[in-house]
Amino acid sequence: MSCEILIYGMGGHMGREVAALTLAGYRGSSLACGVDVNGYDGNAVCHSSLDEVTERCDCIIDFSHHSATGALLDFAVKKNLPVVLCTTGHTEEEKELIQAAATKIPVFLSANMSVGVALLVELAKKTAAALPDAEIEIVESHHDRKLDAPSGTALLIANALREVRGKVPFVCGRQGQAKRSKEEIGIHSLRMGNVVGIHEVIVATNNQTITLKHEAHSRALFAEGAVAAAEFLVGKPAGIYDMNSMLSE
């Protein structure tokens, strides 16, 4: 199905990846236009603000910054357009705005647009359920330009594990006298070089350790997922959707 896409944050690393895919017609998609306050030097229409957009589009893909969520959702609701939110680090206030918008338009919300990560989450939940006494640690690695820590994906995994373990505490990093409690989930963040994204879930008992790992080799992986999500979202009723929603259809 053809899907005309508006890319919010088109001048950023991921916005450029989505632009390249849509310009190439990935999954039948096409680029309606982009929006980026810093501009875009590629061969495509890019506006400096949403107020300038006049092009027809079917869905918005957001790879900007979570602080822009409010303005983007206002525009989407006004235009009755579905939105794929690929940003992370939303504040509680921004999460409330997302929930409110989702009563009027379909919103796809995922901290990670990778199908592989969705599979990692399900495997981690099954492992944690099968080994209820095991200790769990999550290690995530990203490039040295990433702003938020832990990553949205690490928190996605940790929150999914709470579905199995209950509302256990998260401990982000350790130093000094920091003996772990039995039930906690440790989360550790590494920032180095140009690492696209690595997430490991380590589940250990006194007698065995299971390590589950997903490694992204290219940012195009997340752009592909975002375009697939946009295609999936068009025509859906208002509500919150995620990667599992798409995979289960």
Image (tube, grey):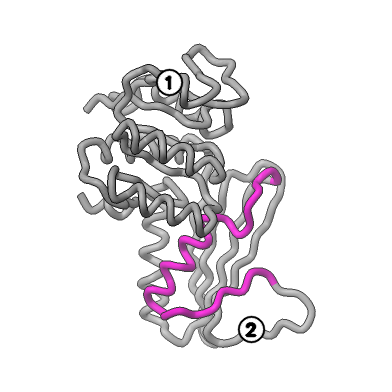
Residue type, numbered disc 2: Arg
Q: Secondary structure at mark 1?
A: loop
- Residue placed at 42% from the left, 84% from the top? 132
Residue at 49 percent across and 52 percent down: it is: 94
Q: Earlier in the sequence, mark 2 or mark 1?
A: 1
Residue 218 place in picture, x, y as percent: 52, 38
Q: Position of residue 185 (x, y in %)?
A: 55, 75
Q: Which mark is residue 53?
A: 1
Left or right: 220, with 193 as reference point = left
Q: Against 170, is 3 above or below?
A: above
Residue mark closest to the camera, 2 vs 1: 1
Magenta stretch contains residue 130: no
- Residue 180 badge: 2
Q: Which quadrant of the rendered structure holds the N terminus?
A: top left
Looking at the rendering, which quadrant does residue 140 occupy? bottom right
Position above or below: 150 against 113: below
User: Is 29 in front, or is 95?
Assistant: 95
Q: Secondary structure at mark 2?
A: loop
Q: CA distance from mark 2 to mark 1?
A: 52 Å
Question: Residue 237 occupies which quadrant of the picture?
Answer: top left
Tell me if mark 2 has few (under 14), some (14-19) or many (20+) residues whose alpha carbon lies within 10 angstroms of its own: few
The stretch drawn in magenta includes residue 154: yes
Q: Which residues are magenta?
A: 144-173
Q: Do the CB atoms of the residues marked 2 and 1 lie less than 8 Å apart?
A: no
Residue at 59 percent of width and 63 percent of height: 139
The x, y position of residue 84, in whole percent, is 38, 41
